[in-house]
Amino acid sequence: MIVPVLENDGLEVLAFALDAELDIIGVMDVGLNEDERRRAERVRLERDRRRFVVGRGQLRRILASKLGISPSDVELDYGPLGKPYLSHRMPARDLHFSFSRSGDVAVVALSTGQEVGVDIEAVLPVPEADEIAALCFSASEGGSYATLGAEDRLEGFFRRWTELEAVSKALGCGLGQSMFWNERDWVVRRFIPRSGYIGSVVIPNWHSRDVTTH
Ligand SMILES: CC(C)(COP(=O)(O)OP(=O)(O)OC[C@H]1O[C@@H](n2cnc3c(N)ncnc32)[C@H](O)[C@@H]1OP(=O)(O)O)[C@@H](O)C(=O)NCCC(=O)NCCS
């Protein structure tokens, strides 16, 4: 079942579970292309292979319903670091999307006319959270994180972490890459894909300055 978890001015986030019955997995598999099937075959753990098939299958179904075509006709291209986007051969080329999963939950963010990035994480203890924050967060993010009390710290960490990943995904780069970005260049929306999880979705803030993507 696909559930809307955020809807705001042309920006939409849909959530779904990745653990599904075998017959559903079979339906999802039918929509996948050869490359995606080969990728699924390379996933060692059966559970993760099924989750990949359901995630990609649902992504295709969501895009297909927006485009008015069938899931197997959705054509994706990839940026240099793996960011998927709709092929120029698809109708509605101004439809942008981003996909994220954590555990058995996945989300697809959709935006018309502007780039979008989404990230979700299960809120679980991270013993090295403070070290990661010191390394990865900007001065202002790190500063506000440091002021959080013990009871707000874990959620505060994941709020900033998902925001960072969402920007990285909107830009089409990876976290392994150095990334220079200004918080004012992005509009961030938070959402809860499921209890125990946290998510951030970002779109460019056109009131700030031009943001180059892909
Ligand atoms: C993109 C990335 C940040 C997401 O990581 P994650 O939080 O572990 O995973 P998520 O579930 O949130 O997102 C995965 C989805 O993001 C999308 N994605 C993959 N690469 C992406 C990229 N470069 N930009 C945006 N989205 C990307 C895909 O839809 C992927 O789903 P799939 O694995 O089912 O195809 C991470 O995979 C990454 O760093 N990739 C780039 C690799 C890279 O930079 N290599 C060189 C380093 S110098």
Image (spheres, rainbow, N blue to C red):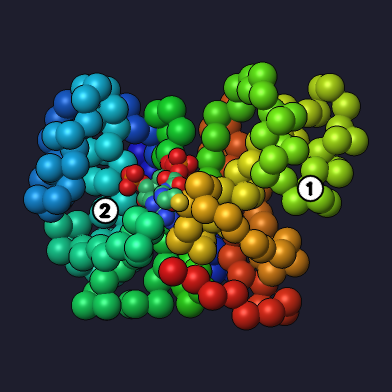
Alpha-carbon neighbours of circle 1 within 10 Å: few (<14), some, or many (≥20)?
Answer: some
Q: Give 70 or 57, whichever is nearer the viewer.
A: 57
Does label 1 or label 2 sit earlier along the sequence?
A: 2
Quarter of the view holding residue 84: bottom left
Tell me which residue sits at (31%, 41%) in the image: 55
Q: Is residue 100 left or right of residue 70?
A: right
Measure the alpha-carbon separation of dots 1 and 2: 37 Å
Res. 100 visible in picture: no
Alpha-carbon neighbours of circle 2 within 10 Å: few (<14), some, or many (≥20)?
Answer: some
Quarter of the view holding residue 51: top left
Q: Is residue 197 left or right of residue 169?
A: right
Vertical position of residue 184 compared to residue 188: above or below: below
Tell me which residue sits at (69%, 69%) in the image: 185
Q: Is residue 181 left or right of residue 108?
A: right
The residue that label 1 is drawn on is 141
The residue that label 2 is drawn on is 61
Instruction: Please state which amino acid type lies under the numbered disc 2.
Output: Arg
List x then y, in percent, for residue 58: 29, 46
Question: Under 8 Å from ligand 1: the CB of mark 1?
Answer: no
Res. 90 visible in picture: yes
Q: Quadrant of the C terminus?
A: bottom left
Instruction: Name the secondary structure under disc 2.
Output: helix
Tell me which residue sits at (62%, 50%) in the image: 164
